[in-house]
Image: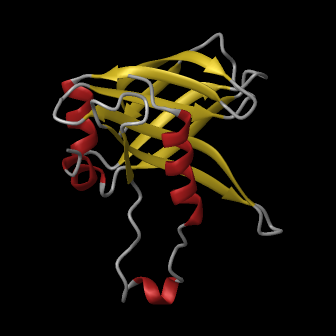
Amino acid sequence: MPVTSTTLRAAILLLACSTAAPAQEEAEQPQAPLWMIACSNESNPEELLCEVSQSIVMTAQNGQSQRVATLSFARTAGQTDTRAFLALPLEVSLTEQVQISVDGNASATLAWQSCDSASCYATADVDAAWMAAMREGTELTAQFKARDQREVNFGFQLRDFPRTEQMLP
C-alpha cells in the first residue's frame, strides 16, 4: 500500500518541529522518541493506514535544517503485512538498489519506485526476519550509491522502534 504524500509530509513535519533537549537536561528529561506514528484513512475511508517513521535532518552552521532521508514502515490497521518506504535525496544513482542492513547484517533490498522534485523513493515488503532484526537491533543502515558512484550510508537508530511498532493498531 502506498503512503500518501500527505501522511509522509505530516510525519516529516512532526519530526522537523521536534527539538532535542540540551545535554545537561538530557539526564533529567526523557528523550524525545526517534520514531513517530501517523495514521490516516485519506486514501481509503474504509481502512486506517498507519506508519512509523524516522527522518535524518541535517542542520547547517547558519541554523537552517533540511531533511535528507526518511524511513517509514506502513501497515494497514489490524494486519501484519508491512511495507518499507525510504525517501532519499535526488542525487542518488538509480542503477543500483538500496541495501538495508541491521547491525551490519543484510536484511533487505529496496527497489526504486519514483522521484519527484523533492526526493527519490524506494520500497520493499518487510518480511518476518527483517522485522525481528529491527526489534532486536540497534541501528538500521541504508546503503546506496550517489550519482557520482560514491557509497553513501544513512544510519537510523532503532531505539524505541519495538515500543513504537507495538503501538500500531
Q: Residue at x 55, y 72 (%)?
A: 19
Q: Is residue 41 left or right of residue 136?
A: right
Above or below for 98 versus 137: above
Q: Is residue 134 left or right of residue 13?
A: left
Above or below for 41 versus 156: above
Q: Is residue 146 left or right of residue 50?
A: right
Above or below for 27 versus 56: below
Q: Residue at x 43, y 46 (%)?
A: 53
| Image quadrant containing the N terminus | top left
Q: Is residue 64 left or right of residue 102?
A: right
| Image quadrant containing the C terminus | top left
Q: Residue 92: percent from the left, percent from the top? A: 69, 25
Q: Residue furthest front?
A: 45
Q: Residue furthest top?
A: 95
Q: Residue 110: percent from the left, percent from the top? A: 46, 20
Q: Residue at x 58, y 65 (%)?
A: 17
Q: Residue 124: percent from the left, percent from the top? A: 40, 20
Q: Kindly indicate the quadrant of the structure image that contains residue 78.
A: top left
Choose between 79 and 85: the one closer to the eye: 79
Q: Residue 131: percent from the left, percent from the top? A: 24, 33
Q: Residue at x 40, y 29 (%)?
A: 84
Choose between 77 and 144: the one closer to the eye: 77
